[in-house]
Image (cartoon, rainbow, N blue to C red):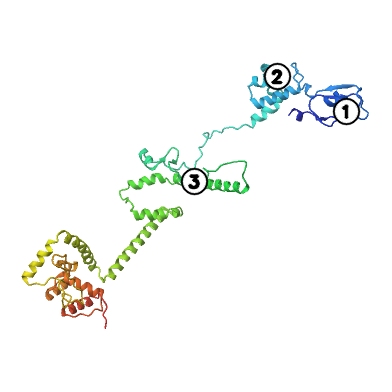
Amino acid sequence: MAADLFAKYSCTYCLDEINGVRVKCVECKDFDLCLQCFSVGAEIGPHKNDHSYQFVDPGAIEIFRSKNKWTAREELQLLNGIEQYGFGNWEEISQRIETRTADEVRDEYMAHYVDGNIGHCTWQPAYERRAKLKDLGIGQPQETPNSYLPPLDVSSKEAAQLGYMPQRGDFEREYQNEAESLVSQLNVSSTDEDDLDIALKLVHVDMYMEKLRERARMKEVCRDYQLVSKFFADRKDKHYRRKNSMEQDIEEKLRCVCMFQTADEHDSLVRAIQRQKELEQRLGELLRYRRAGLTRIEELAHYEQEIARSKGSDSSWKQYPQKDQKRKEGEEREGKQPYSTTKNSTSLIGNPTSLPATEREPGQQPPLTAIPEPAHLLSSTETQLCTSLELTPSQFISMKTYFILNPQAKSESAAEKLIQNHIRSNGWVLRFS
């Protein structure tokens, strides 16, 4: 560094640059030799080795002409030591200079570079350019972006429940909490990396910065619109209704578009989609009833009761198999024929072409169609029809279900014709010519 500050000279004989002491010929004009060439008596051109000469040391000159006689080389080492070890570390600086003590180093620096002309020309402009703190409390207070916001009305228990830290404005689980995974596995290496690897890493960093900007924007929206206070205020409202699983599922799927809507618009959209799903579900139920031959709303309750009772009756027959045997013995003593248990019948009560009867052995569980049902499942007209035809409710429901599912089936008895006419008159099946 010292060679860069002083004038550069080169040896006239070997043309090497001379750093430090050189030999100058007094008789030849602009003729300088390095110490190596001078020691061997180098001669070139008009120069002879017996010419007069003088030693020249550019670093030995005095700059400030002080009483301590600091040379230019010592001054340069002083400035380099201040830059390397810092102001005040005079012991380390003196060891670098080697020819001066710590007190001499301190006095020289303070006398010329702080209190001297150099200090007056350099320190004053630097002092004026220093950073200054402005007191914003003087005069009218400036309105901050959040000055209009009310204090956050959230208890410590509620904040802990939500994972929110009010004083910091942060959440325990950040928005897009997995964003750090984009850069957590990146390894920065200055070697063995081509342009493609560097570009790929820069893309990962750019993606991470984009997520950080989005996270900061979400915090700003949460703070400006007081979403935390509103979250708990809604639950304190007596009219607040906890959302069911369907609404929660819909809101989870619509989370990406909720930022483009107001709160009321988003709630209306969620309710509309929920209503649509409920209607689709109800439509599916009605189609199932229609395929079962039901066309009136008042018949649905009887149909569901019939299905539920059939399932319950199946389990009851398994629990009480002895009751069937006792009922059969009582019917045989009274001379009555069991329902749908004979092999050779001539109608739906005993006609295998209408409803196939099931032959069972003694002690075997009867089929569900043989279970007598209470009369309250039938309408008044159907009750009168059962009484006139001397049918049980179970038989009537079986025949009615059969003709609804098979509207083109032919009736082979008067009872079957009356039941078919009853079904067609109520519009449960279409008339076929």
Vertical relation: 191 (above or below) 298 = above
**Residue 179 badge:** 3
Mark-to-mark CA distance, 1 and 3: 71 Å
In the orientation shown, which residue stands out farthest toward the bottom?
433
Q: Which residue is mark 2?
A: 98
At label 1, counting other C-alpha atoms closer than 10 Å, the crowd grade (few under 14, some 14-19, many 20 or more) is some
User: Does residue 151 appear in this view?
Assistant: no
| Nearer-N-terminus badge (1/3) | 1
Amino acid on which disc 2 is placed: Glu
Location of the C terminus (image quadrant): bottom left
At label 2, counting other C-alpha atoms closer than 10 Å, the crowd grade (few under 14, some 14-19, many 20 or more) is few
**Residue 120 badge:** none
Residue 253 found in image quarter: bottom left
Mark-to-mark CA distance, 3 and 2: 57 Å
Vertical relation: 19 (above or below) 175 = above
Q: Name the residue at 13% across, 76% down.
A: 389
**Residue 31 badge:** 1
Mark-to-mark CA distance, 2 and 1: 33 Å
Q: Is residue 281 left or right of residue 197?
A: left
